[in-house]
Amino acid sequence: MDSVARLSLNQITTERASLGDTVDACARHGVPAIALWRHKVAETGVDRAARMVRDAGLRVSSLCRGGMFPAPTSAERAARIDDNRRAVDEAAALSAEVLVLVCGPAPDRDIAAARRMVADGIAALVPYAAERRVRLGIEPLHPAFAAERSCITTLREARRLAERFDAATVGVVADVYHIWWDPELYDELAGATGRLVGFHVSDWLVPVRDILMNRGMMGDGVIELRRIREAVERAGYVDPIEVEIFNQAVWDTPLETLMPLVKERYLACV
């Protein structure tokens, strides 16, 4: 790519830094957008966080996360819907373009039932999100996370779930770390035309030592990043590209070193 105009820093990449420090770093280094996480926003307060981002001239590409719909009792499932409504309110207050849904695992061994709970949960949330003009982005996670984080594990599954709802409100988030391995990836990206509402980049490091923290800086792993980005664009997605990296070494890197590296690798590899 020849410009950082679409670059967004996902806040998890700077997990050890405060929201204020990350916002300042983005502004100083010419990164035009930021993706926020609810736990970081909570530390600051939604209204103050919104002012910080606005005053820095940044765009909020997404808020993470909503979802986690499956639960063993109807009361717990209702409580999770309530929390998702709060997440929608936060996204609206922050002018976030998308609320990312990490859909949640089965509360027992019945993963099919969990998937039905996810569909029901999204259906319950859609009218609330539509009223507040917040788009919901279903993010499929790598199958290795099915037991702990999400029973929605392929782009096809996420796309078919999203297609039950109005495209103006529900779409799909494509994260290369979770979908790069899929033999149907490029067909599925083409099939998701008009449904892609987010695109996250990092890299898959070899050997894998910790599946959650295995994301690397772009160019340090095995993912065909540019080919995937081109396919995403052919599917009509031309909005922010988020750099989202769970990696202790990256988290320990000072912001003044990390931010130029993020821009350099984004330009060279994405």
Image (spheres, helix red, strand yellow):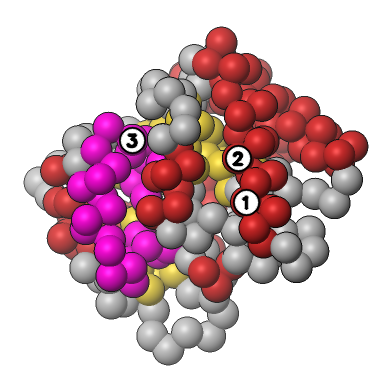
Place residue 120 in its image quadrant.
top right
Query: Closer to the N terminus: mark 2 or mark 3?
Result: 2
Q: Is residue 180 magenta?
A: yes
Mark 3 highlights which residue? 195
Q: Please report contact status of discs 2 and 3: CB closer than 8 Å, yes or no.
A: no
| CA distance for labels 2 and 3 | 17 Å
Amino acid at dot 2: Ala
Q: Quadrant of residue 240?
A: top left
Any part of residue 41 in sight: no
What residue is shown at x 60% (from left), y 57% (from top)? 150
Badge 1 element: helix
Q: Earlier in the sequence, mark 3 or mark 1?
A: 1
Question: Above or below — where is 253 with respect to 234?
Answer: below
Direction from residue 234 to residue 218 in the image, left or right: right
Name which quarter of the figure residue 126 lies in: top right
Residues in magenta, as a range = 171-199
Residue 220 sits above or below residue 72 on the image: below
Residues under numbered marks 1 and 2 in contact, where contact means CB atoms less than 8 Å apart:
yes
> Mark 3 and mark 1: span between their CA atoms?
20 Å
Residue tagged 2: 119
Could you say which disc has been placed on residue 22 in the image? none
Q: Quadrant of the C terminus?
A: bottom left
Circle 1 is placed at which residue position?
A: 115
Horizontal placement of 51 versus 180: left or right? right
Label 3: which secondary element: loop
Q: Would you call the spot at circle 1 few (<14 residues within 10 Å), some (14-19), or many (20 or more)?
A: many
Which element is circle 2 on?
Answer: helix
Tell whether position 226 is magenta. Answer: no
Give residue 92's position: percent from left, percent from top: 56, 18
